[in-house]
Every structure is written in structure tokens, then in C-alpha cells.
Image (cartoon, rainbow, N blue to C red):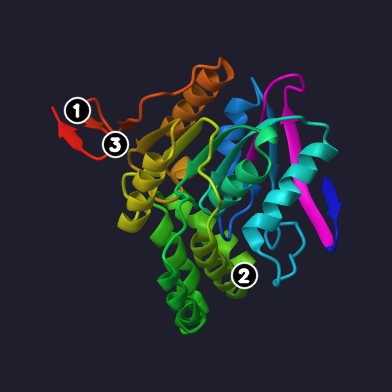
Amino acid sequence: MFYNFDGGKLYYKVSGQDNKTSLVFLHGVAMDHITFESQIVELEKQYKIIVLDLPNHGKSSHLDHRLPYSKTCAHLVIKLLNHLNIDRAILIGQSLGSFIVSHAANLYPEKVIATVHIGGGGLYPKSSILLKAVVPFISPMIMLIPNKYMFKMFAKHKALQKQTQDYLEKSSAKTGKHVIIHLTKAMLLDMVEGISTPIEQPTLILYGDHEAGFVKKMNIKFNETLENSKLTIIKNAHHIANQDNPTDFTKELITFITDTTKEKLISQKKVNNSPDVIFSKNVEVMK
């Protein structure tokens, strides 16, 4: 199915149970809706599922490059929900999708029941303006890498399991260097611009235990800024944790959704890495 918007069309797919809680899945850079297949198979038994190809990806049109990407996509996601007559939904974003989820929750709090962030990061408080200094170097750095190495490197940098790497190598080659460059810059600028207030909805933050160090730090800080959040580390997984370890990821997601829909708000921050590790707000305590 396609949702038509000014200047293009957005590919989406709806499945699952019509009268149940709606879950919207938003993928990361150089991916598409297929990245959530393992979750869809399990969750569509109990929930209404909406997956889509973000602009510049898969079957969807390109977005005007002059528009702020994440914020514009947040508006599109809410317009799609309105088009589908969905009053409220839980938004689940991977990496770039996490930024879109943050904007949607901030701009349309009445439409968002809860948020889930996979290998993403918080947009509040905003990052240092010095991050802008990196932006001019993104394009020449990526363009110097030959295509036959570029997409394989991109996949190995973000995925641990071979099947995940194979998917990401194929999807990134289809998406292309220019889109990857544009969206990498857009994400950096997004972090500098930030959002005005912290997310208020119940929030689940996840990342793989093989995630890049700076992303781990971003997510720990993200968790610390929120009043109603939970931080969970997925074992044997990298940036695309939902594919690298779909069993553990989906289990954590279902638990969070079940608790949220039962209005069991998460009042104490914690990290589930193993039974032996507990994180308080600023201190790691080893039993």
C-alpha cells in the first residue's frame, strides 16, 4: 500500500489484529521494513502492526533534501496514522528511526502511547554545536571508499550475525552512498538541534552488547534524562540488535508492551544485561 504525501509516496504494510494496540516500526539508515520481519511474525498474533519504508528507502519516494529529515518523517508517520484512523500507537524506531520516534513523541504526545529505541539515542538535551564540525568531512570520507568495499564495511560495522550482515550489505547497496551520506549528516544535525523537552511517554531503550562505545554512552545518557524509562542490553548483538538476536529482543519488547498497555509504568531505571549487573542512574554495581 502507498500513502501519498506532497512530493511523493510512502510504502506501508498493515497486518495483525484490527482491534488491538497499534505498533509502528521505523527502520534505520539504508534499511527497509523487512528488517522487522522476525518481530512481525510474533507480534501480529496479538497486535496491529504497521511497517513502512522511510523516504529514500525501499519502495518509498525520496524526500526533498532541503527538509529536516527526521522531523519531516515524524509528521508523515502521524499523518499515516490519521489516514489509517489510528488514534494512538506505540512507536518503535531503530537508529535513525529512533530519532523520528523522539520527534513524533515530542510533537504529537497525544498520538504516542510509548516509545522504543533500538541503537538510537536521545535528542534531549541537544548535543554540542561542535558536532557540526564533523559534517563537512562525511561526504569526502565515504566517497573515497570503493563501492565493492563500502557496503560490506557498512554491514560489518553495524551487524554481528552473518544473516544480518548479508541483509544490510544488500539493502545499503540498493539505497546507495548518496543517501547514506545525506542521512548521516542529517542525524548529526538532528543531535545538535535536539528537541525542546524530554520524552514523557513510557520508553524502552535497547542496544546490543557489541554496540559502538559512543552509542552505548548516548543511550545511557538518554535513559538518565527520562523519568519513565528502562534500558536493556541485548546479548550477542550489534547495532541491528533486533535482527542479530531476534529472540531476546522480541521477548524484551513484548514484556515492555504488555506492561505499558496494562498501565504498569516503569518507575525505576535499570539495565538488564545479566542477573549479576545492576545500573542505578549513575553507578554500576557488581554483585
Mark 2–mark 3 contact, CB under 8 Å? no
Give the side of residue 190 with respect to residue 236, left or right: right
Give the side of residue 193 with respect to residue 279, left or right: right
Residue 165: say if magenta. no
Mark 2: which secondary structure?
Answer: helix
The image shows residue 140, relative to residue 176, as above or below, that is below
The image shows residue 157, relative to residue 150, as above or below, that is above
Give the side of residue 103 with respect to residue 50, left or right: left
The residue carrying mark 1 is 276
Residue at (46, 26) in percent of width and height: 251
Residue at (59, 71) in percent of width and height: 182
In the displayed image of the protein, which residue is found farthest to the front?
Answer: 196
Cα distance, mark 1 to mark 2? 42 Å
Does the rendering let one see residue 26?
A: no
Tell me the amino acid under the disc marked 2: Val
The residue carrying mark 2 is 179
| Rendering quarter of residue 205 | top left
Residue at (54, 22) in percent of width and height: 260
